[in-house]
């Protein structure tokens, strides 16, 4: 399975103004830094939860057709296309409802979407090569305002932690401590974590 980003989210789940209010920063001197911390915190939240937050487009490549395709990075919004390379080396694009069906659970804790077969249909046989099947899909909760508040709160906590600790190691009277994701942020993200991908 190969997963690649096609179109990144147009906006972050929290705004610069949201982050500065959380940080109690009023000047503009470090706006660029704070914006980069927001992006980094969002990426960390997506990696931890294994979810897409603000709407984004991805390509999923498979070597063949499984019984059904489980689509990573919930919540699934839609499938843009499903195609495969046939035995002659030609790319064949399949038709939704006729050749396949899309199951896209919704909600803050949505399970991964699935691409399944209609009753009585079987998958075509693609050429035996890597990445012979290509699925393009759109994932995410929608606009920034649609992202669950627990996830946005975790992003703010992570931004605050990164802003206050500019290095990985902090020297204290007890020695060096490696700083990781703040416990409060992790606590907020756990309910949204998807366990189907990632091996734990």
Image (cartoon, grey):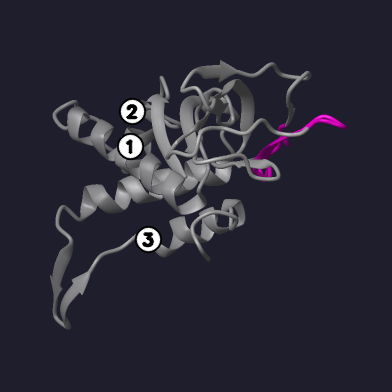
Q: Is residue 8 visible?
A: no
Q: Is residue 114 magenta?
A: yes
Figure quadrant of residue 40: top left
Q: Which of the labelled discs sits on residue 182, or is there none?
A: 3
Q: Are marks 2 and 1 in contact (CB under 8 Å)?
A: yes
Q: Main secondary structure of the magenta part?
A: loop
Give residue 35's position: percent from left, percent from top: 27, 31
| Furthest residue in direction bottom, as rendered | 174
Which residue has dot 1 on it? 38
Which range is magenta? Answer: 103-121
Earlier along the polypeptide chain: callout 3 or callout 2? 2
Q: 10 Å neighbourhood of mark 1: few (<14), some, or many (≥20)?
A: many
Give residue 51's position: percent from left, percent from top: 53, 43
Which residue has dot 2 on it? 16
Q: Are marks 1 and 3 in contact (CB under 8 Å)?
A: no
The residues bearing labels 1 and 3 have C-alpha atoms spaced at a distance of 15 Å
Earlier along the polypeptide chain: callout 1 or callout 3? 1
């Amino acid at each position: 399975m190969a997963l690649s980003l096609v179109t990144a989210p147009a906006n972050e789940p929290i705004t610069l103004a949201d982050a500065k209010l959380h940080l109690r920063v009023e000047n503009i001197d470090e706006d660029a830094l704070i914006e980069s911390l927001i992006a980094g915190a969002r990426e960390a939240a997506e990696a931890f939860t294994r979810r897409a937050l603000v709407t984004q487009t991805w390509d999923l490549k498979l070597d063949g057709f499984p019984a059904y395709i489980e689509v990573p990075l919930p919540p699934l919004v839609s499938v843009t296309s499903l195609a495969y390379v046939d035995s002659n080396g030609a790319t064949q694009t399949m038709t939704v409802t006729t050749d396949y069906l899309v199951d896209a659970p919704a909600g803050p804790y949505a399970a991964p979407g699935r691409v399944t077969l209609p009753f009585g249909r079987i998958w075509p046989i693609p050429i035996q090569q890597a990445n012979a099947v290509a699925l393009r899909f759109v994932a995410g909760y929608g606009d920034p305002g649609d992202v669950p508040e627990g996830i946005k709160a975790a992003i703010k906590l992570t931004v605050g932690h990164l802003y206050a600790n500019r290095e990985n190691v902090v020297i204290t009277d007890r020695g060096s401590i490696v700083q990781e994701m703040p416990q409060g942020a992790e606590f907020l993200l756990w309910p949204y974590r998807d366990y189907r991908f990632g091996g734990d």
